[in-house]
Image (spheres, rainbow, N blue to C red):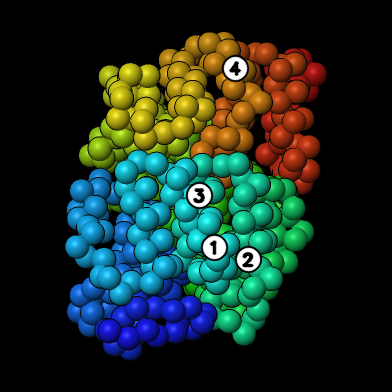
Amino acid sequence: METFRDPRGLAVSAANAAALAAAERALEALLGSRGDVGRHVDEALRCDPQCVLATCIRVAARLLRGTDEIDALRRALAIANIPAYANDRERRHVSALRAWLAGDRHEARARYGALLIDYPRDILALHVAHALDFRLGPHALLHERVAKVLPHWHAGIPQFGYVLGMHAFGLEEAGDYARAERAARRSLELLPDNAAAMHVIAHVYEMQGRASDGIAFLDATRSTWASNPGFAIHIAWHLALFHIDRDDAPRALDIYDRVLRPSASSGIAALVDASALLWRLDLRGVDGGARWSKLAKCWRRKPLRGGRAFNLTHAMMAFVGARCHRRADRVLDLLRNDPHTRASNEPQELALALRFCEALRAFGHGDHRLAIQKLAAMRTQMAQCGGSIAQCDLIHLTFIEAALRSRSARLARVLAAERSSRRPQSRLDRWLFWRADAVGGLA
């Protein structure tokens, strides 16, 4: 067994250089969301069946994507598969992944954070810790963690563009839009195909209400992001949001039908985007028709028990939209009473998801005043929904629409003003103001 150095200067235990090269290709596929991580991991393990780095990349990729194959992943990290010659960094990767597989994501994040203190150029640890920071919060960690390792990186180190992309996303979620856009564009100078950096720029434009700029940017970069397995659907979702803001709901619906419409093979992330877009279109007055029932059918195929509360809220949207009341009640029961689901989520995230799902059900039944009560109870915590600020905006939009449909003009104006203060260029906000005035007899 030999010790090699990876392109970032870190020691890697491997039987041969071919195993290291294949593991690097797997890591690059993971960082670039290219979807072929498994193929490269398989190649690395053919070259060296005990390559610890390759095994850690495989387990991390599956956990990040979401999987119910926990037992199989535990077996992959069994003690017998960790050779005595594995170095300190590799053993700590295994330790962090075992904590995650045991259900303790906070401990996993802490172990990755400690690993990064000693190995700030470990981009696999940074990538996974960054994802856990996003899922677990607070979002301040999204840029703070990356900022701490940035002094150890420079443009001459491979994958520096991915580090800048992560930093850009953290800055955007912290509301520092100018620095976020600069970091994302610098990332694209180093890695022109980094769809994650394009995603950050889409977020910046969304949060500023710059829909026309967002459409122009995504149209100009379409050939890159549309071919990226990890980002194609989600960035198309962002493009649809820009069209909704531009009062072009038919174009947004066309994007749903061409790109977001789910199938039996769609993953959870794709169903989340489809649900969020159809719900926004419904709030905009667009009838989703049979699309709701097809979407609900896809959600019924997924094992919701033990799932992320964030995902369950989007399943709830589909069931409410499709008038699948028994399925909607089942989601509420999971959030309230199922031990496995409750153990898989943070208490605060569970409480927010439950209130929002109760509001969605009331909204679907036409009880907009009850929906307002449920949404008012979570008003100050909406940005902690488990997704990005752009995704959590759906709660605020539902709140505004419930106020409008209950003819609570004053509340609708206050909520629209609150949203407009964050998105000063949004046409959608002006339309919401106009509707609030109409409800109040001021239009």
**How far apart in space, not on screen, are marks 1 and 3 (Cα)?**
10 Å
Front residue of this view, candidates 334 and 267: 334
Q: Are marks 3 and 4 in contact (CB under 8 Å)?
A: no
Q: Give the residue at the far bottom of this rendering.
A: 17
Q: Are marks 2 and 1 in contact (CB under 8 Å)?
A: yes
Residue 276 visible (yes or no): yes
Amino acid of disc 4: Ala
Q: Secondary structure at mark 1?
A: helix
Q: Earlier in the sequence, mark 3 or mark 2?
A: 3
Viewer-nearest of discs 4 and 1? 1
Residue 149: mark: 2
**How far apart in space, not on screen, are marks 3 and 2 (Cα)?**
15 Å
Viewer-nearest of discs 4 and 2? 2
Q: Using the image, determine if residue 119 lies above or below residue 356.
A: below
**How far apart in space, not on screen, are marks 4 and 1 (Cα)?**
39 Å
Q: Secondary structure at mark 4?
A: loop
- Whether residue 69 sits left or right of residue 187 in the image: it is left
Residue where numbered disc 1 is placed = 116
Q: At 71% from the left edge and 17% from the top edge, which residue is drawn?
A: 411
